[in-house]
Image (cartoon, rainbow, N blue to C red):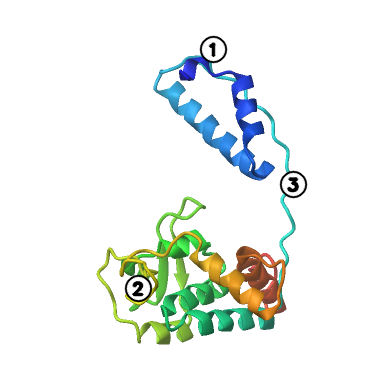
Amino acid sequence: TNVKEIQYSHIEDLLDSLDVSDKTKSNYLSCLKNFYSWLLQRKEIDRNSFPDFPQINYELGYRKTITKETQAAIVEEVRRLTYHLTPKIWLGLKWLTTYISIRPGEMRNLKESHIDRQQKFLFIPHPKEKRPKIVPLIQEDLDILSKIPEGLPDLYFFRYSSNYKRCTPGQRFGQRVFYKWWKKACRNLGIEGVDLYGGTRHSSAIGLREFATPEQI
């Protein structure tokens, strides 16, 4: 359909046809609004062709959190399950529980050049916050990195090794690899209802309240 002909009813019907949560529908709606704003800037449409958009109300679900001891047990189970395949699956999950300012997608996108072993930090060039982040590395992780050979600067750090199933060696981790192994470890340990984000970032933030205020965290 020509963009100039799309009306409120078309967008509402599209949203009603989607078998996803209201939060995801709201995300799709934001993309459509951005698309129409771009069309307006390019003068492909005028204000009269800018459709009205439905209003979607939603409530974010509660994320279950766990203790640091339970978190450590899950990470150790991931290590047991995956270390022989590729140690970086375990390392990525370990880092997600340690460096809570880094999101799973940002972790997966780390390149070799983003890990400064001399100055001891991780560099996140394009975070959700729109401003690059520098995340200092703890000594324990520097010791781990010292045993991992450095790759070429443009290679993704979290990439598959030669013995990981049918994946091409050097290929970047898939979008769900951390989530998949986190959930598998949870099932093995009989832990239910803990997603990757709640079990890593949110649980670590709560654990840090023993040592710092929420504002400092």
Of pointers 1 and 3, the one earlier in the residue sequence? 1
Residue 215 position, x and y percent, is: 67, 64
- Distance from label 2 to label 3 (Cα)? 40 Å
How packed mark 1 is, by other alpha carbons closer than 10 Å (few <14, some 14-19, many 20 or more), is few
Q: Amino acid at mark 2?
A: Asp
Element under label 3?
loop
Which quarter of the rendered picture does the C terminus lie within?
Answer: bottom right
Going by the numbered disc 3, the residue's amino acid type is Glu
- For marks 1 and 3, give the CA distance: 32 Å
Mark 3 = which residue?
59
Foreground disc of the pair 2, 1: 1
| Label 3 environment density (alpha carbons within 10 Å; few <14, some 14–19, many ≥20) | few
Residue 190: which quarter of the image?
bottom right
On the image, the x and y values in percent for residue 185 come to 60, 76
Left or right: where 86 falls relative to 113: right
Per the image, label 2 sits on a secondary structure element best described as strand
Percent of width and height locating residue 70: 68, 80
The residue beneath circle 2 is 116
